[in-house]
Amino acid sequence: MIQIPRGTQDILPAESYKWQFIEKKLNEIANNYNYKEIRTPIFESTDLFVRGVGGSTDIVNKEMYTFNDKGDRSLTLKPEGTAPVVRSYIENKMQHDVTQPVKVYYLDPMFRYERKQKGRYRQFVQFGIEAIGVEDPLIDVEVISMLMTIYRSFGLENLRLYINSIGDQDSRANYNEALVGHFKPSIHEFCSDCQTRIDTNPMRILDCKKDRDHELIQTAPRMYDYLNDASKQYFEAVKSNLKAIGIEYEVDYNLVRGLDYYTHTAFEVMSDAEGFGAITTLCGGGRYNGLLELLDGPEETGIGFALSIERLLLALEAEGIEIPEPEGIDLYICTLDDKAMEKASHLIHSLRANGISCDIDYKRRKLKAQMKDADRKGAAYTIVLGENELSAGNVELKHMATGDSKTVHLDELVTVLEEER
Ligand code: HAM
């Protein structure tokens, strides 16, 4: 039997309402913040991620689904959404848009070849936003506030927002130099990845899952001490404005993020909820001031975040928050014989055309089983159609919740149901 690929999941019909509920809310919040949807392809040139996300990252080194198409082009299923949005921004010359800054969001499947674990999939859906075209602490605050609004709107409470500043390119370079001085003499005590990171991206050592308890990680120089004045000022402005609108945060000086493009503000949201599992990061984001130029674009900057629906669902489950089940159908027509079934199939056609949701039993089960089915489908009303009803032209319209029923002529069914709703 062919099975589903490892690390992927089917969203079955009984569960899909949860996804629809979440997606609807995310669309609403994005509109409320005046972000417009952008849709980029599922695959992009491999080079976009190698250059954009960075050759020293786990994503590029280990996790990409890369293949050659029949024209021998190297393509990659997108592992994240920022580089594609920036590619599109540059390609469509959005720097000239009158609606600058460009504020966009996406809800897209992403692909990473990762070890399967609770909350970690090889295909997952990210909701992400990007605000491109301004460098202003106040837009950083807007982005973070939207993120927190999203989580709060679902009723999540056990959350922690961590922020840090990675500074500008100069601060970052000075800091990396300090880290090399700190780690280099003892780098042989670290994992093989960190032994590479010391040359390619020393900051990522701070983020290593294997070596996180090493004493040198605890005693490492703090990024903050290497921020130049402009970077410090920027960070202070972000923090004070977050405070001003009542957003609580903690500064985590070791927060460096796993992608290479970050500068200045970086942030993550973690869940504190018991039973969440080992992976508690719900969301990550930050500012990327050099990314556009790195991808041959204009000298412009951006900021954004992405969260996966899969982890949002886990967080809701961990906090015991239930997503409301959708309402059932308006009417279920039970039928007693083949003739009634045929008539019912015509009837539902016109009922549906009038906006009344309804169903019949194509399995042609016995009346009792049909009643059960009506119940399962959450029908507000039922009617039974048989020989008598067809000849009289009248049916008993039964309200399922109260058990009340009344006689209705078949021709008036639409009008009565519309009134009853
Ligand atoms: P990221 O930290 O790599 O950042 O991923 C963001 C979020 O995607 C994570 O916090 C998590 O919710 C979710 N995620 C990542 N990998 C998986 C997985 N294997 N299974 C389930 N969920 C996962 C980015 O992707 C950046 N593009 C975010 C960003 C936007 N930065 C600026 N703008």
Image (cartoon, rainbow, N blue to C red):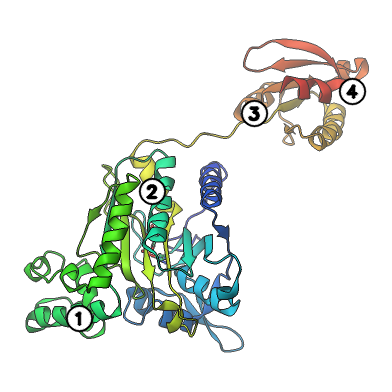
The residue at which mark 3 appears reads as: 373
| Residue located 42% across and 77% down the image | 291
**On screen, 178 above or below 239?**
below
Question: Which residue matches tag 1?
Answer: 174
- Label 4 Cα neighbours within 10 Å, binned few <14 / some 14-19 / many ≥20: few
Q: Earlier in the sequence, mark 2 or mark 1?
A: 2
Quarter of the rendered image showing ligand 1: bottom left
Q: If you read the primary sequence from the N terminus, does the residue marked by circle 3 or circle 4 appear first? A: 3
* Foreground disc of the pair 3, 2: 2
Callout in the foreground (3, 1): 1
Q: Mark 2 points at which residue?
A: 148
- The residue carrying pointer 1 sits among few (fewer than 14), some (14 to 19) or many (20 or more) residues within 10 Å by Cα, namely some
Between the C-alphas of marks 3 and 1, the distance is 68 Å
Q: Nearer the viewer, residue 295 or 125?
A: 295
Residue 57 in view in this figure: yes
Question: In this figure, which residue is indicated by the disc labeled 4?
Answer: 411
